[in-house]
Image: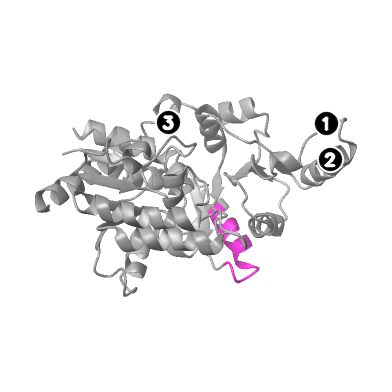
């Protein structure tokens, strides 16, 4: 059985973690888009697509390229099973100019796949209500807890992490990790944090600002002044609002180890890898009660909020801080180690591929 991940390198560690788990399960896989597109290089029984944009190396395809993709998917299905992991409902990169093309790209991959992997039950249930998708094979395989990726930092304690990051040792720390994709996410986090009105709580958001819009460079005086005002506003409200473009694995571990609560700001997203990360580092997580995010938080006893209610995020964040004084973080870790280890997720993928190969 030969498996191909139609995927090139990316900053998101999800694919590499799954591939390592598959290798440990005795199912090594190949990766790369060249083997997907080039019929002379293609010799596989299973083709697994993650984000549809990766077939074009995150570039928005042209209408002609979508036609070629439709034909290529049909050619592949004559000799292999096509698996698709549903990370998003719609592309994170969609805007007014490209939404139609990216919607067509997603629809094409969804309609042609034989099997759809969902990261939680909420996604599977939603697709079973769609006439064009209900006849697919639907399987739930969660996001891995990244336990092996961050194993070198397992002994990192909170005080040590805070000291290295230069943040207060005697404060409650709320972490909002990852890019802020639009103003609504920033408004959500800022309003929830300010609603606490608690001087003993500190917000840490290392990717709050886009790096191109935030720099202390005297050669660009207007940008310098705007950045200075932004920094002053953050500091005055106990917010450490960074503009990091990329973060190393060690830095990621430091941020999560330093926190008491992880705030999931993805109000429009189906999934968030910050949930298993929070659980791995024994933190309480709080986020919107929607999609897979809400399902996972509710089922594990972590607070959720309705994003349509302006006061709800602040109430949920206060509850999360209270839970962080108890054993909810340890419960989260135990749950992740029971259900979401990298080895378990790799083995689940391998078992699915074997079943598909036998049915071919």
Q: Is residue 81 above or below residue 243?
A: below
Residue under pointer 3 = 150
Residue interval drawn in magenta: 307-320
Residue 315, image x, y percentages: 60, 63
Which SS type dominates the magenta stretch? helix
For the image, the number of numbered tags is 3
The Cα atoms of the two marked residues, 2 and 3, are separated by 36 Å
Q: Secondary structure at mark 1?
A: loop
Q: Nearer the viewer, residue 291 or 212?
A: 212
Say which residue appears at 25% left-offset and 50% top-offset. 76
Q: Residues within 10 Å of mark 1 (few under 14, many from 20)?
A: few
Q: Quadrant of residue 200?
A: top right
Q: Secondary structure at mark 2?
A: helix
Mark 1 or mark 2, earlier in chain: 1
The Cα atoms of the two marked residues, 3 and 1, are separated by 34 Å
Residue 172, image x, y percentages: 62, 43
Residue under pointer 1 = 217
Q: Is residue 356 left or right of residue 6?
A: left
Q: Is residue 298 left or right of residue 98?
A: left
Q: Secondary structure at mark 3?
A: loop
* Residue 69 badge: none
Locate the N terminus and report the quarter of the image it occupies.
top left
Mark 3 or mark 1, earlier in chain: 3
């Amino acid at each position: 059985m030969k498996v191909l991940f139609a995927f090139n390198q990316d900053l998101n560690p999800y694919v590499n973690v799954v591939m390592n788990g598959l290798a440990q399960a005795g199912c090594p896989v190949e990766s790369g888009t060249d083997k997907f597109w080039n019929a002379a290089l293609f010799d596989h029984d299973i083709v697994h697509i993650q984000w549809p944009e990766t077939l074009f190396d995150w570039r928005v395809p042209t209408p002609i390229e979508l036609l070629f993709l439709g034909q290529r998917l049909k050619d592949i299905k004559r000799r292999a099973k096509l698996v698709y992991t549903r990370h998003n409902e719609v592309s994170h990169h969609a805007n007014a100019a490209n939404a139609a093309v990216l919607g067509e790209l997603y629809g094409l991959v969804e309609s042609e796949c034989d099997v759809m992997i969902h990261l939680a039950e909420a996604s599977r249930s939603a697709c079973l209500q769609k006439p064009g998708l209900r006849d697919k094979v639907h399987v739930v395989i969660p996001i891995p807890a990244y336990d092996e990726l961050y194993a070198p930092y397992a002994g990192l304690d909170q005080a040590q992490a805070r000291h290295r990051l230069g943040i207060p040792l005697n404060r409650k720390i709320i972490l909002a990790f990852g890019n802020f994709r639009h103003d609504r996410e920033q408004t959500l986090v800022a309003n929830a944090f300010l609603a606490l009105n608690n001087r003993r709580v500190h917000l840490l958001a290392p990717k709050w600002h886009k790096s191109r819009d935030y720099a202390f460079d005297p050669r660009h005086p207007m940008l310098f002044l705007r950045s200075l005002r932004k920094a002053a506003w953050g500091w005055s409200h106990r917010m450490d609002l960074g503009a990091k473009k990329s973060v190393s694995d060690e830095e990621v571990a430091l941020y999560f180890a330093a926190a008491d609560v992880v705030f999931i700001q993805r109000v429009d997203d189906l999934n968030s890898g910050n949930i298993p990360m929070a659980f791995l580092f024994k933190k309480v997580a709080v986020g919107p009660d929607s999609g897979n995010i809400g399902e996972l938080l509710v089922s594990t006893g972590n607070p959720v909020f309705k994003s349509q209610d302006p006061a709800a995020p602040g109430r949920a964040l206060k509850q999360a801080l209270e839970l962080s004084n108890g054993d909810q973080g340890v419960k989260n870790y135990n749950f992740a180690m029971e259900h979401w280890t990298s080895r378990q997720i790799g083995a689940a993928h391998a078992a699915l591929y074997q079943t598909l190969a036998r049915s071919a």
